[in-house]
Structure formats: C-alpha cells, structure tokens
Amino acid sequence: MAIALSSSQTSEKRQINKMRRALLTLAQLRAGKFGKAIASILLSRGTLSESTAAIYTGLPVLNSRAVISALLSSGLLYVVGERQLQMRNRRRYVEIIFGAESVSINRAINDILSNAITLMYNLAKTLEIEQIVYYCKYDKILFLEREIEEYNYNCPICGEPLTPIIVDIDLLEKYLEEVKKRFSRLTF
C-alpha cells in the first residue's frame, strides 16, 4: 500500500535530494572521482572517517586523507567528533569523524558562484579596453593581445596559432546581469 506524501513532505524531500546532488557534484569538482565516491559514502552512512573512506574506496589511508582534506578545506565537510583507536602494537591514536550539512554545502556553492561572477566582471572590465581576445583551442585558454604579441600570436604554452575573438561588450554585460539574477534566485 502506497503512502501519499503531503506537499510539504514532497518539497522537503526534493530539497534534500537537491542538496545531495549538489554535494556529489561539488565533491567531484573539488577532488575528482574519489571525492564523489567519498561524498556518496558519507551520504549513505551519515558520518565518515579516513579509515572508513579508505576501506570503501580502496584508496590507501593517506590518499583518502588527502581527498577528505580537499573536501574539508572547500567547506563541504566538517569535523563531527573523534574516537580513540588502539593499534595491535598497543599504540593509541585519534581518528577524526567527518560529516556534511546543508549549510556548509550551500555556503560552498555560494562561494564558488560569487567567485565566478567576480571573475567574469573583472574579465568584462578588462575586455572593455581590449575587446579582442585570443583563444587556444588545445589548452582552452584565453589570452589578451598584450600577453601574446611577443609570441607572434601563437600560444605560449603549446605553440599553436591562436584564434582571435571579438568580444561584444553589450552582449557580455547582458549575460553577466542574467547570471547575477539567476544567482540571486539560487537557494537551497
């Protein structure tokens, strides 16, 4: 027999699932496929330690520690507590337990998006003066003319010829305003 959920329960479940997807996506962006694996383990278990992450991912403990450190420094994880462990040789050590919460995930998303918007605004201000940029399709990098004149309009990284792009400032400003408007509506 199926149980019908009220609209508030459905909305709450959607909100939780949205946060879960955001955590998995951000973890993958910050720490690659192992970041996503560790985040999914965290979601399924509720909390996570470095040794537990190593067991479930197959990574050595030092590598799982590095991935967890990347997720911790980006604000996706927080320290829940610690537990005392004793090794076979009777040495004791402390293992740190990590968790995730919607506030930290939301903060990380807002930080990433606000940094991207700031970068785009700074780029737009620079392009108001230059209006022509050069693109390397191999390295996926944009260069300003003053940066590549000495390289004879070839990419300073790979040496391939660069593609000139004329920037429409008005269109770029409209795009930035649209991004800013959508960012202000983004809430979890």
Image: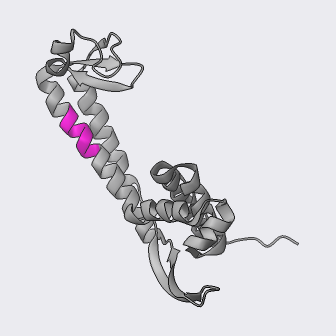
Which residue is more in the foreground, 117 or 138?
A: 138
Q: Residue 84, percent across and down?
A: 54, 89
Q: Nearer the viewer, residue 133 or 57?
A: 57
The residue at 44%/74% (across/down) is 78
Residue at 42% x, 63% y is 106
Q: Position of residue 72 (x, y in %)?
A: 42, 66
Asked whether residue 7 is in view, the answer is no
Residue 79 in the figure: left or right of residue 1: left
- Counting from the top left corner in percent of width and height, residue 103 is at 42, 70
Q: Residue at x 27, y 20 (%)?
A: 156
Q: Which residues are magenta?
A: 117-123
Rendering coords of residue 115 (x, y %): 28, 49
Q: Quick check: is 121 in the magenta stretch? A: yes
**Residue at the far right in the pictured view:** 1
State whether residue 43 is above or below residue 165.
Answer: below
Colour scheme in use? one colour
Q: Main secondary structure of the magenta part?
A: helix
